Amino acid sequence: MLIPISNVPRDYSWGSTELIPALLGRTPTGGPEAEIWYGDHPGNPSLVTGGSGQTLDVALAAAGEQPLPYLLKLLAAGSSLSIQAHPTKAQAEEGFAREEAAGIARDAADRLYRDDNHKPEIIVALSDEFHALVGIRELGTTRRLLHVLLDAQGETGGALAHLDALLSTEDETAVRNALEWALTEASAADVAQLTAALDTATGDSFAAEVASLRVAAGDFPGDAGLFVALLMNLVVLRRGEALFAPAGVLHAYQSGLGVELMAASDNVLRGGLTPKHVDVPELLRVLDPATGPAPLVEPQVLEPGVELFAPPVPDFALVRAELEGEGHRIARRGPAIVLATVGRVTVASAGESVLLAPGEAVYVGGADDDLVLTGAGEAFVAQPGAPI
């Protein structure tokens, strides 16, 4: 069963004005176009192509198909998203039940758990570069960055020195203490000191990190989340590279276009660089304070031109297929969504076929027949992951 689907870009303020229109081959609207959702998530279900006005969730229910365990997106960041982390499944279930019992409206600005699911996510870069902050950097390296900033200001005290002292034990307690200080005690003057240090820092040491933080400081003036960003790994993905954000890992996508796949959830605990609600105790409760390199995902090459990104979650896996006239047969494990990102791609299964242009997608349901992709271009196939 093939169901062609589409959706309208969401106009979040951080969205790029150009990246999605360029991929779709149309003129920009002039406004931000941040995400296109492909799936049956009730927050923004896809539309069934053909003019019926039916949404995918309704179509799947009518066909006796189960709700999807994942949500596929095109994501186009023109400025940084909020720093955020997502809960584990158990944390989400407990938090959702707690807020339901408290009578907090699901669309309330201070609602944290809008459903009872976890939200691990993977993103694969489509642009030549995709910039992100992911995970807590090794603390000794962060302290060296702090010393660069202190030297730039010619200072030995103040907020930067205090943060350096908090991190001196170089353990998980230090991470928690630093984050709590940044989000509950750091003053406007403290943020101003960090901003000034970033403006005056020179040299090659940590140049990329300093440049990234300068942009964040300009986009979110006075936001103490800048100190949180200072603790995080800067990642620059090249086209086709991927990163994975499991439960509890702080992350903030900054710029670029990518294909994002996540568990079907809308649970977000924010940690700064945002005007939205930040619940510090709850963020620290779900936080994974481990330090180290960013969690990049190395794909498994299934055959020339076909890569599998399979993080250790049962909710989803993602296949990237490059086509140059030859066909690729993709084994299917449950309901799939195929999204074209380059050229023209024909999707065939169980005697049906659909031709996709960039930004167009098709839901594939029914029996787990293999998919056959042909044409010239690139496509991504989202489907459930292997059981854990």
Image (cartoon, rainbow, N blue to C red):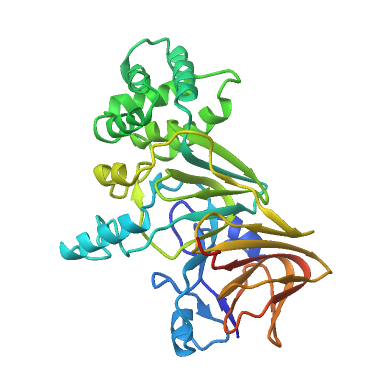
Number of labels in the image equals 0
Residue 365, above or below 292? below
Which residue ends up furthest to the left in the rendered image? 102
Which is nearer the eye, 177 or 271? Answer: 177
Quarter of the view holding residue 285: top left
Q: Is residue 54 visible?
A: no
- As drawn, is 35 to the left or to the right of 23? left
Give the residue displayed 47% in from the left and 22% down from the top.
140
Q: Residue 149 location, x and y as percent?
A: 45, 19
- As drawn, is 150 to the left or to the right of 91? right
Which residue ends up furthest to the front in the rendered image? 388
Give the residue displayed 49% in from the left and 66% down from the top.
71
Quarter of the view holding residue 20: bottom right
- As drawn, is 269 to the left or to the right of 3? left
Give the residue displayed 23% in from the left and 63% down from the top.
97
Give the residue displayed 46% in from the left and 25% down from the top.
142
Which residue ends up furthest to the right in the rendered image? 325
Q: Is residue 283 visible?
A: yes
Q: Residue 163 location, x and y as percent?
A: 35, 22
Residue 40, above or below 100? below
Q: Residue 367 location, x and y as percent?
A: 60, 83
Residue 288, above or below 339? above
- As drawn, is 214 to the left or to the right of 19? left
The N terminus sits in image quarter: bottom right
